[in-house]
Image (cartoon, rainbow, N blue to C red):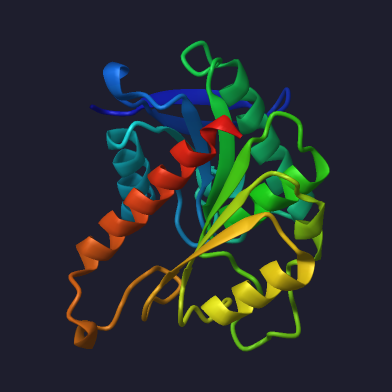
Amino acid sequence: MEPEELKIAVNDRESVTALLYQASKGERAGVTAVLGHGAGANQLSGFMRMIAGGLAARGIDAMTFNFLYSELGRHLPDPKARLESYYAAVIDAALRHRKLKKNRLVIGGKSMGGRIASQVAAAQPDGIAGLVFLGYPLHPPGRPDKLRADHLKDIHAPMLFVQGARDSFGTEEEIRDVIKKLNLPATLYAIEGGDHSFKVPKRLGVPQQDVYETVMDEVARWLVQNRSR
C-alpha cells in the first residue's frame, strides 16, 4: 500500500511533507512511530522507505517527514531550534491525526533525525511514550570528546538504541557507557560489525537485507512490548 501524503504546517509561512505508512487494519498494534531522516538524505531515501514500510508490515503505523531544508532541496541542515520546531509540528499532527488518535506515540529516526527527536523529548515530553534511535550520532566521527548526550538524562520515556558495533558516530561500547553513566531507561540493540548505516562486512557472511529485517523485527517487538507501559 502506498503511503498517505500529508502537508503539515509549521507556521503561517512554512510547511513540510510527511508520509503515513499505515499498518493493515487487522494487524495494528496501536503505536505510531514518527521517524525523522538523517542529515544527508530525506524521507524518500531507500533506508527511510524500507524502515517505515517494514514497520507498517509489522503492525506499527509509521510516519516520516522532511525537515524544511531537505524539503527545499538544500543540503545544509537548518539551525537546531528550527529543526526542533519542524519535528514538534509533526508530533502535533500525528497526535491529532484522525487515524492515529488512539495510538501511543513513539518518536525517533535515523542519525540526526533521532538526535532532534531526543532534544524535543527532553524539552517537551508530553504525549511521547518512547524513542527509537536508528544509529544515534553520539559524537562527530573522530571526536569522542564532543558528546551529544547530556540532554538524554532529561528523557524519562523508554528508549531503544539500534547501533552498529563499529559506528564511527558512536560505537556499541560508547552507547553502553552513556546509558550506564546517565542511568537512562534504555535498551541497546547492537549490530555486530555494523556501521552508521547498519551495513556489515561481507566477511561475516550475513546478507545485508537479513540485517535490516532483524532490525525491523527488533524495533517492532520493542514498540509492542513497551505499548503497555
Q: In the rendering, at what x and y percent does residue 195 appear? A: 42, 76
Q: In the rendering, at what x and y percent does residue 115 appear? A: 65, 57
Residue 43 in view of the camera: no
Q: Quadrant of residue 180?
A: bottom right
Tell me which residue sits at (74%, 67%) in the image: 149
- Pick the front one: 216 or 183: 183
Quarter in which the C terminus is drawn: top right
Q: In the rendering, at what x and y percent does residue 119 appear? A: 74, 51
Question: In the displayed structure, does residue 109 sit left or right of residue 55?
Answer: right
Say how many tags the image has: 0
- Pick the front one: 122 or 20: 122
- Pick the front one: 182 or 10: 182
Please, which residue is most extreme toward the top here? Answer: 98
Residue 89 in view of the camera: yes
Quarter in which the N terminus is drawn: top left
Task: Establish if 28 lies above or below 149.
Answer: above
Tell me which residue sits at (37%, 77%) in the image: 192
Tell me which residue sits at (49%, 30%) in the image: 32
Tell me which residue sits at (57%, 76%) in the image: 169
Task: Establish if 53 lies above or below 51.
Answer: above
Task: Establish if 79 lies above or below 26.
Answer: below
Q: Quadrant of residue 123?
A: top right
